[in-house]
Amino acid sequence: MAELEYLFYLGCLIPYRLASYEISARKVLSKLGVKLVEMPDFNCCGFPLAPVDHELALTLAARNLCLAEQRKLNILTLCNGCFGTLNEVNKMLKEERAIRDRVNGYLQNIGMEFKGETSVKHIVHLLTEDIGLEKLKEYVSNPLNGLRVAQHTGCHLVRPAKKVDRGDNPEDPHMLKSLIRVTGAECVDYMDEAECCGNPIIGVNEEIPFELTKEKLRRVKAAGAQALITVCPACHMMYDFNQPRIERKFNEKFGIPVLHYTQLLGLAMGFQPEEIRLNQLRVKPLDLLSQIRR
Amino acid sequence: MPRVYKIFASNVLKTGYVYLMPESRLKRREAEGLPPLPKSKVEDVAKLFEATGFSEILESSESLEKVEVKMGD
């Protein structure tokens, strides 16, 4: 396999709250022979400010894309929101001359110019397309046979489908399901799998996101899943970090551990739970670990 | 403008990130063996706030909030 090298775009939420995602991703990718180049002086992808100023969000994203162009590398991100924004802006600026010229006008103030020479990948795309499922299987030394999990792909990895344009179906996403099957675990179906976690509106309304999260956890539990698998830090925060709060609010116990996909893959690749920071999850995956050890 | 977006904007302007990273978290990164978090070029970010006209929107929204608070007193 040719050396895979990417500019690693961390975004804001992962370094702020989710070291477990970053650490497990770095361990797994290193073992897979993927080289990560640290991205210097990057800024927020722009997603959190898009609801109040589209022009600024576009330009913040464009600055990050220019940093990647300067280093002649493609961007790799672990975050759905960062992927969705950077990928959409990259595509828009490549295809729409008038917008590109306008944004380049702003970028001129900082001596930058968007040229359209980079691409943006989420770790799901790297594992599925650049490494490939068959190759990935070769790294599975500890297949998680007998483990039943559910997936939550999240919105910005697949929506809006025309803008994301990566071949996954937003109403019935399959990439994460295929990646889960590589580990040997069973990926169970459940009702309304494509429902949003609610995180994007939590800053202005808590009721709707918590209702959505409660419904999702209830359906995952009803399907008999032993864990929920995510690939987005914001979705993960909703289902793991907020789970005890939701249990108290609705007086309903779920006890569903929520693992980053990189942790599930890490277990299948033979990493010890502590190495991939399973101990940092809010809902402890004790039953799941004892089943894997049996 | 909802307050949460003003906080986000102010954080991005100060640090490049949408959240203010506490010193303890930066130290924990080091203890975990993670590379240091890159410092964003905030002077560039500030220029982009100006160039896109968002600084003005932010300022007018802040002065509007002051008026609203005064009227509510």
Image (cartoon, rainbow, N blue to C red):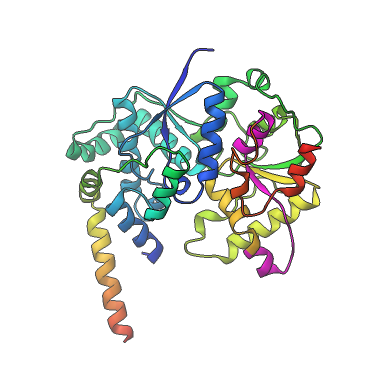
Q: Is residue B39 above or below residue A179?
A: below
Q: Is residue A29 above or below residue A61?
A: above
Q: Is residue A210 visible?
A: yes
Q: Which corner quadrant of the image does residue A178 belong to? A: top right
How many numbered tags mark residues here? 0
| Quarter of the figure with the C terminus of chain A | top right
Please name the residue shown 23% across and 52% down the image: B53
Q: Is residue A160 visible?
A: no
Q: Is residue A205 above or below residue A174?
A: below
Q: Which residues are magenta?
A: A245-270
Q: Is residue A80 left or right of residue B7?
A: right
Q: Position of residue A43 (x, y in %)?
A: 33, 43
Q: Which corner quadrant of the image does residue A41 belong to? A: top left
Please name the residue shown 80% across and 48% down the image: A223
Q: Position of residue A24 (x, y in %)?
A: 56, 37
Please name the residue shown 34% across and 61% down the image: B6
Foreground: B23 or A40? B23
Magenta-drawn stretch contains B29: no
Q: Position of residue B14 (x, y in %)?
A: 28, 54
Q: Is residue A123 above or below residue A85?
A: above
Q: Is residue A22 left or right of residue A48?
A: right
Foreground: B30 or A110? B30
| Quarter of the figure with the N terminus of chain A | top right
